[in-house]
Amino acid sequence: MGQGQASRAALRLDRRGLLQGFAAAAAAAAAGPALGRGSAYPALQALIDGYVAEGLVPGAVVGVLKPGRYQPTWLTAGRSLFEGGTAVSPKDTLWRIFSMTKPITGIAVMQQVAAGKLTIDTPVAEIMPEFRQMRVLIDPEKGLESRPAEKPILVRHLLTHTAGFSYTIAGNGPLEKEYRRLGLLPMSASVLVGPGDTPAPDLTTYMARLSTVPLHYEPGTKWRYSIALDVAGALLERLTGKTLDQVFESQLFGPLGMGDTGFTVTPSQQKRLSGLYAWQDPKTGKPMAKPTLIDGPEKTELSQRPAMLAGGAGLVSSADDYARFAQMLLNEGMFEGRVLLPRPVARLACSNLMERGVWFNGADGNGAGGRAILSDARKADPGAYGVGTWGWGGAASTLFHVDQVRGAAVVLMLQSLGNPKGPDEKRYNRAVNADLA
């Protein structure tokens, strides 16, 4: 969003944040409806205070949740803009959550699984016939020469980034260049459109183009960060006969009371936007001493409906809204007495759905749009994840996770795009783990 090539460069250079942007720990003390400097979580409060004091972000909000009723403990620091703005608020401040859209799409698919409309092993081509005769690259490094795929793409492959698709932010090989030529971008915003690139089309056109392009690898055989959740969003549209925003509203946002989450903002919501800042020079790609505001309350692309409703990266939300989603997952499908997912399906969604022998980072799994931590390395690394956590993050350094083992969930909202100095994921994990000790 914002100023074209400068923003696009920032987002591409923030690939590490995209790949690592998911939270890892939980909280231990009982959460009440507190706001401000919660003594129960001093390390987390010190963390976001430090982020602001060091000039990494103008402001940040953390929400800590416990199972049961929705009674988050909120921690806040700073303001919505470096240039002033307003004090950040769990309910009032709005944030671009980028890839934290993916778990929402994944859970919406699992709701359709619970309704009996499909299974996680349903071939995608049964719903989207254009993907029936896919081809696979022979050598992804050399060109687009391909062979027929041996396996069909399954729904579980879309949910876990194992379908064989790629991402324009995941490399610069022949396939990624072809994606850019065809407009197969992570979202519609001009942040991703550079010289020679084709803007992202609507989802129907997007899928028609994508189905003509070879896969990077055989479905189900490898994890590769990708547009798979965007395909899952298109699958939801095809399955329900609704647009993706209507699917989200009827299945999740309405029932959860997420009134400030969507693909666009109204004029009144626009005034509540936090500033999105890029930290790289658009010409050199090198870090800048001061960040550049590329999207904010004065001018934002979120004021216009995007051509592509991106199930992988397109939403804006408040900390309070997203915490409601996290609370539902922490409660294994229930929110304030209402079942949005049957418990067995909720547990399945947050488990490892990848096929046997396929791993995320060599040791962990992937569920319905989020990473599933399968091993615990915290004794050796205080910044590591605890076993049983599930979640994901966004390009602007937002994070969330649920932890069924320790019975808590955490949502972190701030905005920083491509700053190599932070906010740092391991630093965040160390703070959370300290508050759990």
Image (spheres, rainbow, N blue to C red):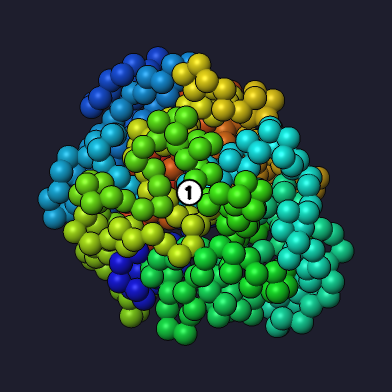
- Identify the residue at horizontal 63%, vertical 35% (top origin): 111
Task: Tell me if residue 187 comes above or below residue 173 in the rendering.
Answer: above
- Residue 431 in view, yes or no: no
**Where does residue 430 sit, x and y in percent of width and height?**
43, 36
Indicate left or right for 437 with 53 as reference.
Answer: right
**Where does residue 397 sit, x and y in percent of width and height?**
39, 50
Task: Tell me if residue 299 comes above or below residue 174 in the rendering.
Answer: above
- Using the image as rendered, state which of residue 19 and residue 209 is in the foreground: 209
Question: Helix, strand, or loop for circle 1?
Answer: helix
- Identify the residue at horizontal 33%, vertical 47% (top origin): 95
Q: Which residue reaches farthest right?
A: 150
Q: Quadrant of the N terminus?
A: bottom left
Task: Tell me if residue 145 comes above or below residue 81 in the rendering.
Answer: below
Q: Which residue is mark 1?
A: 245
Indicate left or right for 62 with 231 as reference.
Answer: left
- Identify the residue at horizontal 70%, vertical 37% (top origin): 113
- Identify the residue at horizontal 77%, vertical 82% (top origin): 145
Q: Amino acid at mark 1?
A: Asp
